[in-house]
Image (spheres, helix red, strand yellow):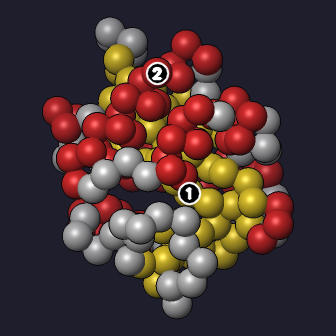
Amino acid sequence: MTIITYEERYKEDFIRLNRQWIETYFRLEESDLKTFANIDSYIIGGGGQIFLAVDEKNDEVQGCCALINHPDKDCYELAKMAVAPHAQGKHIGYELGQALLVYARRKGVKRIYLEGNTRLAASIHLYRKLGFEEVPLVNHAYERCDILMEKWL
């Protein structure tokens, strides 16, 4: 498995993986649909990046996450992290998170936040392992969000 940055040919994989986990636990929200419809302009064109975990044997995308720039908040967001069900438990989320943090440090990012849900205990554990800490929950973009976390670089 290799972690790569976004390539247009993996756009549908990014959307598929994210739709899959969101629809398994919650429901798609307007913010999700807006992001999926504007990946190139909102994430990539906005100064962010998408990271993909690709199985080099069969070119299958097994996981993904995004680093989204929020210049109005002077920070970035770790968003849309998803791992295919058959690939879970193989530390792919951790590897994606590490790649995102390395990229963010090189880019000079100072603060990254994420919106999560405590029902997904494994993801909260992962975020803590990556160094994110809980902060007061304010101004969240998703109904499903019940925890806000951040990391200073």
Depth check, front residue: 136 or 89: 136
Residue beneath the point at 23% across and 70% down: 119
Return the x and y of residue 47 as percentages of the image width and height.
79, 44
Residue beneath the point at 21% across and 47% down: 24
Return the x and y of residue 8 as percentages of the image width and height.
61, 17
| Amino acid bearing label 1 | Leu
Does 134 sit above or below residue 6? below
Depth check, front residue: 10 or 33: 33
How many residues crowd mark 1 within 10 Å: few (<14), some (14–19), many (20+)?
A: many
What whole-number distance in Å separates the C-alpha atoms at marks 1 and 2?
19 Å
Q: Which numbered disc flags the more N-terminal residue, 1 or 2?
A: 2
Say which quarter of the image contains residue 75: bottom right
Residue beneath the point at 82% across and 61% down: 71
Residue that carries the numbered disc 2 in the rendered image: 12
Does 59 sit above or below residue 92? above
* Image disc number at residue 92: none
Say which quarter of the image contains residue 72: bottom right
Does 127 sit above or below residue 93? below
Q: Are marks 1 and 2 in contact (CB under 8 Å)?
A: no
Return the x and y of residue 36 as percentages of the image width and height.
54, 35
Residue that carries the numbered disc 1 in the rendered image: 78
Foreground mark, 1 or 2, reads 2
> Which part of the image, by quadrant, shows the C terminus?
bottom right
Q: In this view, does 98 lie to the left or right of 143?
A: right
Residue found at the far bottom of this picture: 136
Q: Is residue 133 left or right of residue 109?
A: left
Q: Is residue 125 visible?
A: yes
Residue found at the far front of this picture: 30
Q: In this view, does 108 lie to the left or right of 65?
A: right
Return the x and y of residue 96 as percentages of the image width and height.
46, 45
